[in-house]
């Protein structure tokens, strides 16, 4: 049962929405911007040059993450979620590593993210890969109170 990472497939769009909705409802609430992004991933994430990755275990989608192009030098890692029953299996690590590889392959200089200081496990994961806290830019998310960047 080795995890497998694949790129976006329309048939997994609902799973992307469900995984993200689950963690948002557990820790915060689903904001309008979350709905706008999740319901329009093709236009908001993929068409501008981003990507969505899915982590599969035995052909079941158990994790996901999005890469959103900010500009030609910066890409944002967003919407990282792992099914609660599969947490603790290092799948988040695999998804972060996939994002770092994507950013390097596409010659971005910076991989950034916004998060919440309430999410200790996530922040520790990001720090493990070398992300550093930077001043928080304007964001569409009320829950976001920390920005981190990894310089590639």
Image: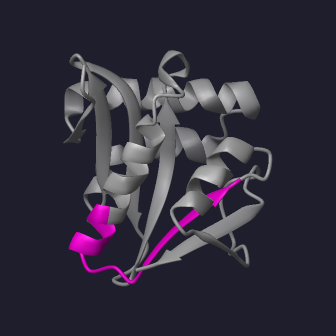
Point 32% across, 69% down: residue: 103
Point 74% across, 32% down: residue: 27
Point 47% across, 21% down: residue: 86
Q: Is residue 77 visible?
A: yes
**Vertical relation: 78 (above or below) 6:** below
- Tell how many labels: 0
Q: Residue 119: where, in percent of width, then height?
A: 72, 44
Q: Residue 61: where, in percent of width, then height?
A: 32, 24
Quadrant for the N terminus in the image: top left
Magenta residues, as a range? 101-115
Quadrant for the C terminus in the image: bottom left
Of 32 and 63, the residue lying toward us: 63
Does 84 sit left or right of 147 as displayed? Answer: left
Quarter of the figure with residue 131: bottom right
Q: Is residue 48 visible?
A: no
Q: Is residue 112 magenta?
A: yes
Q: Residue 73: where, in percent of width, then height?
A: 38, 84
Point 67% across, 42% down: residue: 121
Q: How is the image coloured?
A: one colour
**Vertical relation: 18 (above or below) 20:** above
Q: Is residue 13 magenta?
A: no
Quarter of the figure with residue 8: top left
Q: Residue 127: where, in percent of width, then height?
A: 61, 62
Does 19 sit left or right of 7 as displayed? Answer: right
**Vertical relation: 96 (above or below) 64:** below
**Vertical relation: 45 (above or below) 138:** above
Does 122 sit left or right of 129 as displayed? Answer: right
């Amino acid at each position: 049962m080795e995890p497998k990472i694949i790129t976006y497939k329309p048939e997994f769009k609902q799973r992307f929405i469900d995984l993200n909705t689950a963690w948002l409802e557990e820790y915060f609430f689903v904001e309008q911007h979350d709905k706008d992004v999740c319901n329009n991933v093709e236009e908001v994430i993929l068409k501008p040059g981003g990507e969505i990755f899915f982590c599969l275990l035995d052909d079941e989608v158990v994790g996901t993450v999005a890469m959103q192009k900010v500009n030609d030098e910066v890409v944002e890692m967003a919407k990282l979620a792992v099914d609660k029953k599969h947490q603790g299996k290092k799948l988040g690590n695999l998804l972060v590593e996939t994002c770092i590889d994507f950013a390097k392959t596409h010659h971005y200089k910076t991989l950034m993210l916004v998060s919440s200081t309430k999410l200790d496990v996530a922040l520790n994961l990001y720090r493990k890969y070398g992300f550093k806290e930077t001043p928080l830019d304007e964001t569409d998310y009320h829950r976001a109170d920390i920005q981190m960047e990894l310089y590639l």
